[in-house]
Image: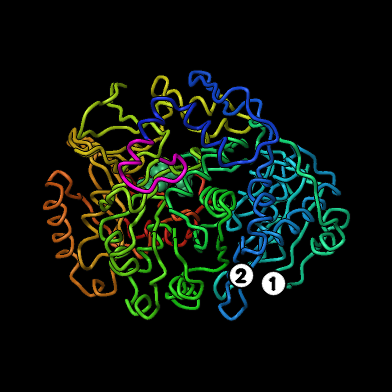
């Protein structure tokens, strides 16, 4: 039996039981057998959720880049580590081998050092999906600098807030980025942000779009000439197990973003372990995660997890719709992708388009399909399964969070039988609990409650940068001695979990708990509907009533609106019950989304309750024009 690589269901249960009976022994064995350490730990785990304080592998010393790069060189030095697929399909893809990655990371690390960056300093990285992004992340880790990647779609205000919150001295950026047929002037956004960031001393600029940009004397420099001059080897900094590796901001439901801080050893062990098992990666596979490295998915499952396993990981610069809606599938065919990991929002967008975009490509290389980021609705799940996986590739619906560092609940493909919309079973070492309104754990199946985790896993975030109290309040105060995820979940008869959505999206109508996701699923199954979002609004009798925002497919546009409303409510009635029927249905051209693709329900709630005088922080909103229109036509 192998703890590290689970190959069938029986083995999963055995490993899982072992991991829960004795988590320390379980993780110690994984850490011992699959990573290189400069010094082993004195103690595997020390934890106290009441403080909260969590320490894994204390006393150990390591460098994560040695595990992600150096140790692979003698066995797979010529293997492609990073496969870069540019925005423009006519531009050649770039294969960066493990040997080349070593050199490029070392050179970049030496550039950072030359500019005065030391262990513990924060470096903000605001780069598009080009190789320099992954290389910068790894270069920081090489010298013990704490990277904080800010997604290069964020505005200058959002960027400035993050730079100041973590106290970065340096920003790495590029002259611009490509996005479909558009270019974006990233450097100008940085310049604007830096008007409010007095502590930034250095800005290094990668050249991507060759645009004319302003360089501020004494602060800004082109990156490439410095890299060319730098020495091609860099001794890795010795890191303690609990030294910070990175800070990554995640938006809270309100207020200022939370800088989730992740540390070195536990994060490495957990992301590597889950990558191997969730994607069943084999030596010659080509793995592609379509996320941006600006999100946790990119950190854990484009950079660290895959590289720690010596994988070939694809970095895609472009968008799914350029030059047309077949781009993803064209890339799958071109690079013979074996594991493909994307978000439900992308699947839904592509499922709206003509099937020819999918069927004209050879997708036979695919073995495992993944989704992450939000509940996947049944219709999207089946479309993905039928048309992309051709019913042969298991879908891993992976549930996790920025805070969790790695995947906590997911099927293990070829072992765990999948079930549409279910993330299924916890990873080894993960102990979920469903809690009722009174703070008690609901034992037995089926169950429906708030999702908590009872025991630490190695990659849990250790704090919110600069605000430990907020960390405690947000995650460890709602339920005693448990990490509270903020999500609701169901557990079915066999113990499979289905994430029903944020608990703040649960709406209580006439005393009944209604999750938004199942209602939206029901609506989306109507043939005329493309997408929908449900929010609650105050109601005299029911407490809350339901307001639905519905995007129609082109085929629905010509239909009579009142008939459509009736049919949608009938559909909900049929699928869930009359209690879930909507009081109001507004047909909209789009939904307000964050840049990570999440619906901003906060705004929809305000519009539904006619409280639009102050919409709150909209800096992460991707499509403000849609909000204007929804407000104008609100019911
Ligand atoms: C929230 C975390 C983890 C990387 C991307 C999102 C929702 C995430 C699923 C899933 C249902 C999911 C949860 C979670 N979520 N994955 N498979 N099924 N919901 O990271 O931005 O930190 O968001 O995303 O609500 O709490 P994030």
- Report the residue marked by disc 2: 178
Question: What's the magenta region?
Answer: 1-15
Tag on residue 209?
1
**Compared with residue 469, is residue 169 higher up or lower down, i.e. above or below?**
below
Q: Secondary structure at mark 1?
A: loop
Residue 13 is one of the magenta-drawn residues: yes
- The answer to whether marks 1 and 2 mark residues whose Cβ atoms lie closer than 8 Å is yes
In the rendering, at what x and y percent does residue 174 appear?
71, 62
Q: Which residue appears at 25% of the width and 65% of the height?
A: 529
Residue 541: x, y in percent?
17, 36
Q: Residue furthest front?
A: 1
Vertical comparison of 431 with 283: above or below: above
Q: Give the mark, 1 or 2, whose residue is nearer the N terminus.
A: 2
- The image quadrant where one finds the C terminus is bottom left
Horizontal side, residue 542 vs residue 333: left or right: left
Q: Position of residue 375 (x, y in %)?
A: 34, 50
Q: Is residue 391 left or right of residue 223?
A: left
Mark 1, Cα crowd under 10 Å, few <14 / some 14-19 / many 20+, is: some
Label 2 element class: strand
Q: CA distance from mark 1 to mark 2?
A: 7 Å
- The reply to whether residue 448 is visible in this rendering is yes
């Amino acid at each position: 039996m192998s703890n590290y690589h689970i190959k069938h269901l029986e083995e999963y249960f055995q490993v899982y039981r072992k991991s829960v009976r004795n988590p320390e022994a379980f993780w110690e064995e994984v850490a011992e057998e699959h990573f290189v350490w400069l010094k082993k730990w004195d103690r595997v785990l020390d934890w106290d959720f009441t403080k909260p304080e969590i320490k894994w592998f204390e006393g150990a010393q390591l460098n994560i880049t040695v595990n992600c790069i150096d140790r692979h060189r003698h066995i797979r030095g010529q293997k492609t580590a990073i496969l870069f697929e540019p925005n423009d399909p006519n531009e050649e893809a770039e294969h960066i081998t493990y040997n080349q990655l070593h050199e490029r990371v070392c050179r970049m690390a030496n550039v950072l050092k030359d500019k005065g960056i030391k262990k513990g300093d924060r470096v903000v990285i605001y780069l598009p999906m080009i190789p320099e992004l992954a290389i910068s992340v790894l270069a920081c880790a090489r010298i013990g600098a704490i990277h904080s990647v800010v997604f290069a779609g964020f505005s200058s205000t959002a960027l400035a807030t993050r730079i100041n919150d973590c106290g970065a001295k340096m920003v790495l950026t590029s002259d611009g980025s490509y996005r479909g047929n558009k270019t974006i002037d990233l450097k100008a956004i940085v310049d604007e942000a830096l008007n409010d960031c007095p502590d930034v001393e250095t800005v290094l600029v990668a050249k991507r779009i060759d645009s004319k940009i302003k360089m501020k004397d004494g602060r800004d420099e082109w990156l490439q000439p410095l890299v060319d001059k730098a020495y091609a080897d860099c001794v890795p900094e010795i890191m303690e197990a609990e030294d910070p590796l990175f800070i990554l901001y995640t938006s809270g439901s309100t207020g200022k973003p939370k800088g989730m801080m992740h540390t070195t050893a536990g994060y490495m062990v957990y992301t590597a372990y889950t990558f191997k098992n969730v994607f069943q990666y084999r030596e010659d596979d080509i793995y592609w995660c379509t996320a941006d490295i600006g999100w946790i998915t990119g950190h854990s499952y484009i950079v660290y997890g895959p590289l720690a396993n010596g994988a070939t990981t694809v970095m895609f610069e472009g968008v799914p719709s350029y030059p047309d809606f077949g781009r993803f599938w064209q890339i799958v065919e071109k690079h013979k992708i074996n594991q493909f990991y994307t978000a439900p929002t992308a699947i839904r967008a592509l499922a709206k388009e003509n099937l020819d975009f999918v069927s004209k490509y050879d997708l036979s290389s695919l073995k495992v399909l993944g989704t992450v980021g939000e509940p996947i609705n049944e219709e999207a799940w089946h479309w993905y399964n039928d048309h992309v996986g051709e019913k042969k590739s298991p879908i891993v619906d992976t549930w996790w969070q920025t805070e969790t560092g790695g995947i906590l609940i997911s099927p293990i493909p070829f072992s765990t039988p999948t079930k549409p919309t279910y993330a299924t079973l916890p990873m080894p070492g993960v102990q979920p609990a469903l809690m009722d309104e009174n703070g008690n754990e609901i034992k037995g199946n089926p169950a429906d409650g708030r999702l908590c985790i009872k025991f630490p896993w190695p990659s849990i975030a250790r704090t919110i940068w600069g605000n430990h109290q907020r960390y405690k309040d947000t995650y460890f105060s709602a339920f005693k001695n448990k990490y509270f995820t903020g999500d609701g979940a169901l557990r079915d008869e066999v113990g499979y979990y289905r994430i029903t959505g944020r608990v703040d999206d649960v709406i209580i109508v006439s005393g009944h708990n209604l999750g938004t996701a199942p209602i939206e699923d029901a609506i989306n199954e109507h043939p005329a509907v493309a997408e929908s979002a449900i929010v609650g609004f105050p109601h005299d009798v029911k407490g809350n009533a339901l307001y639905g925002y519905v995007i129609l497919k082109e085929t629905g546009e010509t239909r009579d609106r009142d008939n459509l409303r009736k049919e949608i409510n009938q559909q909900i009635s049929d699928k869930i019950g009359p209690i879930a029927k909507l009081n109001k249905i507004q047909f909209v051209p789009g939904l307000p989304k964050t840049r990570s693709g999440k619906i901003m329900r906060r705004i929809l709630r305000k519009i539904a309750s006619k409280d639009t005088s102050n919409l709150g922080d909209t800096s992460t909103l991707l499509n403000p024009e849609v909000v204007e229109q929804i407000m104008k036509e609100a019911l």
